[in-house]
């Protein structure tokens, strides 16, 4: 199938996903389960990576500022801008695409090859709505909180790096963090996060739902889903940056 055919099939799938759930109680239970699987269980890796990425950015910025006439507070300013604009929303979303995307594809793909999805359809259940919509809502509502946490931990990681390495003053760093704070940059990062969260939930679901074959096919579909999700995140990041910041 051509790329255009896959794109058309993907949008047809979305039309089935965004329909009213048949049973509210079952849908709520599935939604809370996805909050746990896709959100809470990703909290640790996002926090760990954000903290150390912030520290690395601060240290590398300090190493590249060798001119004594350049103020040290620019280290905090550069770390803040880098973390908020790119590293928190984009880098963490790519990490989540690998972790969450493979889980979504493998779980739905396994249901497909074991004919559990066919059983749902025989019972008159909209399988796409039942399986995919809770994942979409869980990522869209929860991932902005993850990214805001990543922003705070990234900036805090830079402060700890200065405290432990003595390469720059913590006071200068915090002065740079507070310098020229623009709330729109946080809004921009959250808008990107919502788009990325939608891609993280739907693209792997597409690959898992339409997989054909056995367990080997599910493994290949998981790899393809992660690759295509990352590609689409990078492309969406470019266009969103062009539309919102230029």
Image: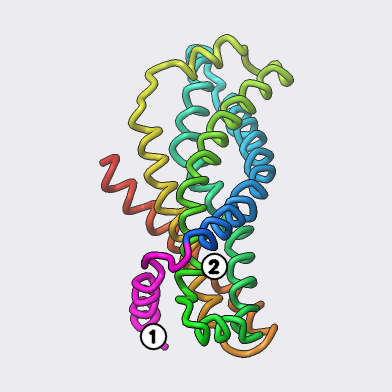
Relative placement, left or right, of 54 versus 20 is right
Residue that protrudes farthest toward the right in the picture: 164
Front residue of this view, candidates 229 and 205: 205
In this figure, which residue is indicated by the disc labeled 2? 227
Q: Residue 70 appears at what percent x and percent y?
A: 48, 16
Visual colour scheme = rainbow
Q: Which residue is painted at 65% across and 41% down in the image?
A: 49
Instruction: From this view, report whether residue 156 is shown above or below residue 179.
Output: below
Magenta region, main secondary structure: helix
Is residue 75 highlighted in magenta? no
Of the 4 image quadrants, the one containing the N terminus is bottom left
Q: Which residue is painted at 52% across and 39% down in the image?
A: 145
Element on which disc 1 rests:
loop
- Could you tell me if residue 200 is visible in this image? no
* Label 1 with label 2: CB-CB less than 8 Å: no
Q: Residue 147 appears at what percent x and percent y?
A: 52, 40
Front residue of this view, candidates 150 and 142: 142
Q: Which region shows up in magenta?
A: 1-23
Quadrant location of residue 97? bottom right
Looking at the image, tell me whether mark 1 or mark 2 is earlier in sequence order: 1
Q: Which residue is painted at 33% across and 46% down in the image?
A: 241
Instruction: Please tell me the numbered disc located at residue 155.
Output: none
Q: Residue 148 appears at what percent x and percent y?
A: 51, 35
In this figure, which residue is indicated by the disc labeled 1? 2
Element on which disc 2 rests:
helix
| Crowd tier of the residue under label 2, counting other residues whose Cα lies within 10 Å: few below 14, some 14–19, many 20 or above | some
Q: Which residue is painted at 65% across and 38% down in the image?
A: 47
Is residue 5 highlighted in magenta? yes
Q: CA distance from mark 1 to mark 2?
A: 17 Å
- Could you tell me if residue 15 is visible in this image? yes
């Amino acid at each position: 199938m051509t790329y255009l055919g896959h794109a058309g099939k993907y949008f047809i799938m979305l039309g089935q996903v965004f329909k009213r759930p048949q049973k509210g109680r079952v849908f709520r239970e599935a939604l809370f389960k996805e909050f746990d699987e896709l959100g809470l269980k990703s909290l640790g890796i996002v926090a760990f990576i954000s903290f150390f990425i912030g520290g690395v950015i601060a240290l590398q910025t300090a190493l590249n500022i060798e001119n004594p006439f350049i103020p040290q507070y620019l280290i905090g300013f550069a770390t803040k801008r880098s973390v908020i604009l790119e590293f928190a929303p984009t880098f963490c979303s790519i990490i989540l695409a690998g972790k969450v995307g493979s889980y979504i594809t493998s779980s739905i793909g396994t249901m497909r090859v074991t004919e559990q999805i066919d059983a749902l359809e025989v019972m008159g259940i909209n399988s796409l709505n039942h399986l995919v919509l809770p994942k979409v809502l869980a990522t869209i509502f929860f991932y902005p909180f993850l990214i805001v946490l990543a922003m705070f931990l990234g900036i805090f990681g830079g402060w700890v790096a200065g405290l432990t390495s003595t390469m720059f003053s913590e006071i200068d760093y915090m002065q740079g963090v507070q310098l020229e704070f623009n709330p729109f940059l946080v809004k921009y990062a959250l808008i990107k996060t919502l788009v990325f969260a939608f891609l993280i939930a739907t693209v792997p679901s597409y690959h898992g739902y339409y997989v054909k074959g056995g367990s080997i096919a599910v493994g290949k579909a998981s790899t393809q889903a992660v690759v295509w999700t990352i590609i689409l995140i990078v492309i969406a990041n470019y266009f969103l940056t062009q539309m919102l910041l230029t």
